[in-house]
Image: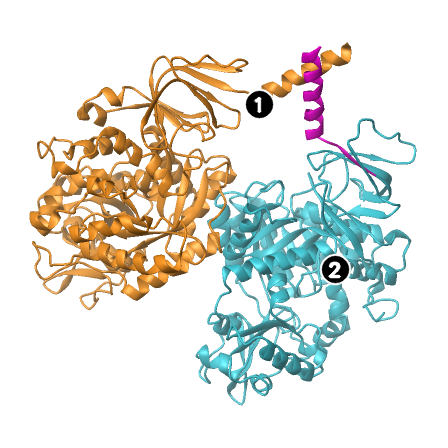
Chain colours: A orange, B cyan
Amino acid sequence: MKTLLAALAALFLAQAASADTLIDNVNGYTLDEDNKVVRFRAMLIGDDGRVKDLLSGRDKDPKGVDFRLDGEGRTLIPGIIDAHGHVMGLGVAALTLDLSDTNSLQEAQAKIAAYAAANPRPRWIVGRGWNQEKWGLGGFPTAADIDAVVSDRPVWLERVDGHAGWANTAAMTEAGITAETESPPGGIVEKVDGKPSGIFVDAASELVAKVVPPPLPIVRDRAFLAAQEALLSVGITAVADMGTSAEDWAVIRRAGDHGRLRMRILSYSSGLEPLLAVAGTEPTPWLYESKLRMVGVKLYSDGALGSRGAWLKQPYADAPAESGLGFLSDTMLRNLMSRAAMDGFQVAVHAIGDAANAQLLGAIEELADTYEGDRRWRVEHAQIVDPADLPRFAEHGIIASMQPVHEASDWRMAEARMGVDRLKGAYAWRSMLEKGVPLAFGSDFPVESPNPFPGLAVAITREDAQGQPPGGWMPEQTLILSEALAAFTTGAAYAGFAEDRLGSLEKGKLADFIFLDRDIFRSTPEQIRDTQVLETWIGGRKMWERD
Amino acid sequence: MKTLLAALAALFLAQAASADTLIDNVNGYTLDEDNKVVRFRAMLIGDDGRVKDLLSGRDKDPKGVDFRLDGEGRTLIPGIIDAHGHVMGLGVAALTLDLSDTNSLQEAQAKIAAYAAANPRPRWIVGRGWNQEKWGLGGFPTAADIDAVVSDRPVWLERVDGHAGWANTAAMTEAGITAETESPPGGIVEKVDGKPSGIFVDAASELVAKVVPPPLPIVRDRAFLAAQEALLSVGITAVADMGTSAEDWAVIRRAGDHGRLRMRILSYSSGLEPLLAVAGTEPTPWLYESKLRMVGVKLYSDGALGSRGAWLKQPYADAPAESGLGFLSDTMLRNLMSRAAMDGFQVAVHAIGDAANAQLLGAIEELADTYEGDRRWRVEHAQIVDPADLPRFAEHGIIASMQPVHEASDWRMAEARMGVDRLKGAYAWRSMLEKGVPLAFGSDFPVESPNPFPGLAVAITREDAQGQPPGGWMPEQTLILSEALAAFTTGAAYAGFAEDRLGSLEKGKLADFIFLDRDIFRSTPEQIRDTQVLETWIGGRKMWERD
């Protein structure tokens, strides 16, 4: 009998070591395979961090549950997957000068001056987030505008979209920029009276960026942790990192190796070099219990609309001599895509302008013949599409990876840049959906805030935070909430070849979910926009909680 | 009762999942904390891959053992740890043209011609292993010597010690080498009649190496697996990789991520850049169940003796105008060492010549005041030491990381380079040991074969494979076998901050061991040299077995 008791004791210990957790009394929502809404009142989570069962009203509670957690009636939805963000960019932005909330050049100047005074070291002042469109300058700022407040130290500030940089005179001097400096291919050195103005668009920004001292490892580590914290706090449990450099990858691995990686990252390498160096001949396996995977490559086919780098079929309405920058020849684009695809990597290509989207669609159409199977070619942004090209997305399983908040930020500028008539296929979520194109939504953080709830609100209203334009811009393109949520969850998971484990709360998938302070399915768009995340759980473990 | 039976069944399953293995009937040897020999007849290994117990004659067999393996009386010793090797170098050598077994220029030429014929692609022919000393040329070979057999494709061949490269004319043309090309700091462009001869010593080799196309990821992966196989087959269970590049690290991680990493690698980054990029602000944790860790940095203070790059206090006896190359100023060396040490990284510095060793000792003496605690400064090679400097090794816990086989390969050349009188502190293992300097032995593969048994034989005889010189070169420096084995096991583990888990078979350490075809403690030096490894076990799992 002593032996039997010992056996029972051992059994008890063995059970405790593989404990199930029941989270009950929740107002639960998830989506099924057809993206239909599923309600539940309790969720059983296994010790492996996966969903074991969902219980609705009529279901009996399971027996032998080891831990039980009262959801207190709160709303629980799947963790948000941001299908397009820049993790280290967000982290660095959190640690450096942030101009994204400035509404005038004067505000920006005051902030630069204050930052310089508060941060005597390091010598270089680096920042981001400015947007001359918001400042109403009628054009770009200049080096002299920074010199007026900081002239003794180099200052280098990236535009909000990352597609232009703004230097002061000290920075241009260190970079060796002179009146003779010419615009490189794929970039523009803006000039005033024949002299560099301080603005460097797209490829030209490398002329200055290359002399900015790289951040120390400890700064990179802090930046990553800051980004992770920011993302968890708005309910993002997984993100597609769109353009992971070799340095970024090392930082994320360091977090994983030291047990500091708390969210999931689907990495798309910044061009081919990190892809081949890191992943080598095939996508990496899922690492750190499905927290990290390098699945493919991020390429660029053009710039952005704000800096007039987006490549358009016709000239810019507000700059008739320009039609943007196509970064790559047709052949070069296909060669780069092909090099990745031949080893089974997924290919995600930035395309903003209608010419860039058309070029990319042509490349995919050609490559799809060679690279068969489930390729999930991703068009990142798919922002301004010629309506004639829209049907081409539905072929070859192309994924439209779009960012609803961009529409709210850009619609006025888009009208100025192109005129209303050329925007019939702009930010055209519903058209995509109706044509059967898989949608994946993200925020493009740090270009926009990573908070997905304004994104959901914009997706269903096409109104900005001020309710403009009333009734929505091209309101025929609005989605309903479940459709928008699907693009931020199941759609984003599918877009990253992760639908086997992420995106919804169903048996066998990882228990990534968030508690909200309201029921978004019974809220106005304004209320949805203001939703606060209360807790963020990943793999059945609470990773973040609001104070 | 049904419940109790179920409980018992569960208990049985739980036990089976954490099974112990007894390997008995072995002729076992290991070393204790004082490096005294310990004998055993059986070893119990836990499911965690660690030693649970060693049993000697009088000990009773443990009860409840799940698996039992008959050692058939074979000799079992701890896995060998090579304290200084180049893993990817070995792998690349295995996949490219290998000239290390050539005994004349004619043989080398024949091998180059045959390789070129057999390998029409890739266009560049890359190889290594040549040693003009063995060829009796009286000097370096020239580009014309390669041109005579391959002139239509570039050929680039590294010297056996990696400290010089030999190019044909096609390779020099692609690299833009002309009569005007000057020797860079820390390197020599050899010239004949004012024109580059085809030989590029130390830093000069980068002039050509930089235009050699880098290997594809798949080639790197294959190279790594080839190296791992070669090392396991000679009983090496762990290696200190002396100079891991960022690319090398990516390859090893890829092996780890895909479950192909079967041995243990202690990585010392190739200079500071990969160290800061990969490990960041502290050594990495042990990864992949103690199979990989980046613990520190490898730096170079001089070149090698064969190419007269070793930095000597007095000129070379056989080249009175030369005294070798000190790679770094005193200040630069200290700054690099300091940068690594300030973040707690271990510092390993290559020092061959007596001037280089003296410079390095001076640097350590200065830094040891700033960086307190258990630093384990490593002098790699410590090959030609001024006898006046030998006592300085015993201070500050400096580790002498030496390669016995180098002595057998080099003694004739060393006498030619320096004369007998200046070699009293050369390859001075016993002097180091007697002064209390921790010894770590390795092979410097692929400069030498990774097989540790010739190393053990040389360590105890100071004779080469031909028995030369009879009675040994400076025989007062010979060790006894247990001392030599300690330097290849416990010493090498200590030298890598791994003595808590590696180096010997004692309770709680990882069960890394090898079966041999003979009892090396009852063998002649010749028999020790010819020892064959039968099986290689790592973490209690058989990772390699002789066919």
Quarter location, residue A189 = bottom left
Looking at the rendered structure, the kind of residue marked 2 is: Asn
Q: Which chain hosts label 1?
A: A
Q: Are marks 1 and 2 in contact (CB under 8 Å)?
A: no
Q: Which residue is mark 1?
A: A18
First to last magenta residue range: B1-23
Instruction: Specify the quadrant that holds the C terminus of chain A.
Output: top left
Residue occupying the point 66% across, 52% down? B239
> Which quadrant would the N terminus of chain A be assigned to in this image?
top right
Along the line of sight, the residue nearer the viewer: A174 or B296: B296
Q: Is residue B212 above or below residue A188?
A: below
* Displayed quadrant of residue B323: bottom right
Residue labelled with disc 2: B451
User: Which residue occupies the foreground of this view, A107 or B419?
Assistant: A107
Is residue A305 depicted above or below B3 in this figure?
below
Image height of B530 relative to A69, above or below? below
Identify the main secondary structure in magenta. Answer: helix
- Give the answer, above or below, for where B188 lies relative to A110: below
Classify mark 2: residues with Cα within 10 Å, few (<14), some (14-19) or many (20+). Answer: many
One can see residue B525 in this view: yes
Q: Is A493 within the magenta? A: no
In the rendered picture of this protein, how many numbered marks are placed on residues?
2
Measured Cα–Cα span from mark 1 to mark 2: 46 Å
Residue lying farthest to the bottom in this orientation = B193
In the shown orientation, is residue A338 left or right of residue A460? Answer: right
- Residue A101 rendering spot, x and y as whole percentages: 19, 37
The verdict on residue B13 being magenta is yes
Can you see residue A99?
no
